Structures are given as structure tokens and as C-alpha cells.
Amino acid sequence: MKILLIHNRYKNKNIGGEDIVFNRELNALESFLGKKNVFSYEVSNDNIKYMELAKNIFFSKKYYKIIKEIIIKNKIDIVHIHNFFPMLSPSIFKAAKDAGAKVIHTLHNYRWWCIKGTLYRDGKGICEKCAVKKFNLDAIKHKCYRNSTIQSFIAESAFYFYRKNDMMKYIDYFFVLTEFQKNKVISLGLDRNKIIIKPNFNVPLDSSNEIQNVKKNGYLFIGRLDESKGIKELIENWKKLPKNYVLTIIGDGPLKTYVEMNTSENIIYLGRIENEKIKKFIKKAKFLVQSSIWYETFGLTIIEAFQLGTPVIGYNIGTRKDFIKDGWNGFIIFDKQNFVDVIKKSYNFEKYDFLVNNCLKLAKEYEEEKVVKDQINLYKHILNENSW
């Protein structure tokens, strides 16, 4: 069984969960299947040439040819595509099918239905107005793609073209990351028979991240500093708490200046930190606060926190309840008005060790070996559909 993984990377300054997951998955599959059986093809938005992109964003003949040749030359059985937009275009799905491979696409976001990818609009909240097949002027009016009217027009035109020409028909199966996401994309019109839940996984901890006898203090936020991550709500709520409730913020983004202007004795901003070093902060935090107010497709930091014995507090939105069990491995904020009350409840929670032990227990479900072996078995079943 030979696998080809494909990914359109984001810019280096914007590296996020999708790029991290792709790297981990590629390394793990190489380890389990052998490098001679796992191939990869990547492009990066750092190398975008805008005249070329304008020509190829609807259907890239260049990448169609490249991908088809790779598949035929190496006798690839399965092509697993992570991100394809904007450089690769859905031409790579057709290339894979034309070359005789099975095609899998991981839905890391909701971009097929929302050019922003989040089903969220700044200033409005959850928004599904564009989750239909028609051309949507709202996405352009509100500059939903990169806060640009021109780029939003191009992105909306591209996805209208993809939907109108049913480019999804070249995809055999979609991997989604949680039960919530599965139900959401079904509600958006995706065929339930083509959807498989395949979560992300934690990489094994090295010795420096052992959690025994670690003294935990304070609360931690990690993420992109924008409205959909709930950073404004988080800070405004934190101002209502006593000074001994200390929140540390790690991340970068368009609201960086806002965060810097609102630092205080108990709101500490550390800026952007390399992913390898972030685990040290998670390990020492008493709670991770997942304040996102959009439908996250997974929540990589949640399972990383569990792996390090750090309970998580999050809103009752989207995937949060797929991971956080209220009072068992963290706390769910069921009503935004009760944010401060929930934080206060967590501060001196008597059964904290109970929360920690349950975090570690749930984290085992997302261990690399388990998830990757399950993924390989899924590949085998897909190649031999009669074995389902």
C-alpha cells in the first residue's frame, strides 16, 4: 500500500494546526509504513505568484499534471489531501481519480461552505449564510477572506466554481475530526456515507515533559489572537476577577495590539512562542482556557493539555463537548454570562487531582500509535471496500 500525502501550507508566519497535523501525520505514517511507501507533495503560500495564482486558482493544469505523474510513476494507491487552497486547486482531486487512486480529503475547516473557513463573521458571531451553492455577495461585502474585498471576490468565485462543477465528486471519502464536525457537515449537505471520523493525535512526550510532581499555577490561553478565538471576551471577563487569578496569553494575530494594551498584574502576554516550547507552559498551567467562539473542527491544544494533565475550561460551542466533560476533566461554560462564576469554581476545586487523572485517561484515546494504526486500517478498508 503506497500513500501520497498532499498539503498546501500556510505562510510561515501563520503556521497553525493544519500544518502541524500534516507534519505529524507524515512522520508517523513514514514510521509505521516505511518511507518507501509514503510520499508527500507540498506547496507553500510563501511562494505564491499572484499572476500565476489568478490563472490557476479555478483549475490548475500545472498541479493536475504534477500529481498525476507522481501517482502513476510511484503506483500510488491512496492520495490523502489536507489543504488544497489556494495554490493546488481541486484539479488535484481529479488528477488522483484519473490516475486510478482512491482519494481522501481531511476537512480541517469549513472552507467548502465558507471562504473564511470558520462559519464565523467578526462582529456577528456564528454565520452560515454562505453555506449554500449559490454565489454569495455577503462574503465579498464583509471581506470574509483575508479582510480584502478583492481576495474575497476571487475566493468566493473559486468556490462557487468548485461547487457548480461538483469537484467533490472526485473525493471518495472525507475525514472529519469529531462527531460534532461530522453532524455539522452532514447538515451542510455532505453525503454521510462518504464521511469518516479520524481524529488528530498527540505525539509521545519526551522526558522533559514528564508531569510527575509538577506544581501547577494559573490559567493559560494559547491561540491566534482574533475575534473568533474569543480573546476579547476572555480579557474583558478576566478583568472582573481578583488579582490572584493570573492568565497567561500565548499567540499572535490581528488583535495583538489589543492584548498588549490590556496586560495587567494578572493578564500576562508572552507573544508568539515556538510550538515545541509551548508544552512547558501547558504542563505548568492549572487550567487551559479554550475561549474560542467558532465551531473549531478539533482543538489540538485541548488534547495536548490532557496529555500533560492540565484540565480545560471551554464554552459550550462546537467540538468542546466532544472532549471536555464538565466536572470530569475540566469545565464547560454553558452560559457566557457565567464565565466568571465557572473560573471562580475552578480556582480551588477540591477534586483537582480527579480532573487531572481523567485528563490523562482521555488522552490515551488520542495517542499516536492508536490513532495512526486506526488510520492505516481505514486506508486498507478503503482500498478493499468489500471489507467494510
Image (spheres, rainbow, N blue to C red):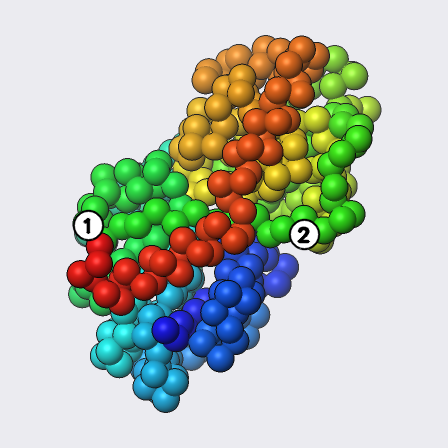
Point 40% across, 53% down: residue: 374
Point 30% across, 50% down: residue: 196
Nearest the viewer among 212 and 266 is 212
Judge the density around disc 1: few (<14), some (14-19), many (≥20) Cα neighbours within 10 Å. Answer: few
Which secondary structure, mark 1?
Answer: helix
The percent position of residue 239, horizontal first and vertical second, equals 69, 19
Q: Can residue 3 be seen in this view?
A: yes
Specify the label residue 273 is tagged with: none
Point 62% across, 11% down: residue: 345
320 w.r.t. 19: above or below? above
Nearest the viewer among 279 and 371 is 371
Nearest the viewer among 304 and 6 is 304
Quarter that holds the C terminus:
bottom left
The percent position of residue 136, horizontal first and vertical second, equals 26, 50
Q: In which quarter of the image is residue 347?
A: top right
Total labels drawn: 2
Position of 367 with respect to 322 (left or right) is right
70 w.r.t. 179: above or below? below
Q: Quadrant of residue 163?
A: bottom left
**Residue topped by disc 2:** 275
Q: Indicate the amino acid at tag 2.
A: Asn
Position of 324 with respect to 170 (left or right) is right
Whether label 2 touches label 1, CB < 8 Å: no
The percent position of residue 365, horizontal first and vertical second, equals 49, 41
The percent position of residue 70, horizontal first and vertical second, equals 39, 84
**Residue topped by disc 1:** 193
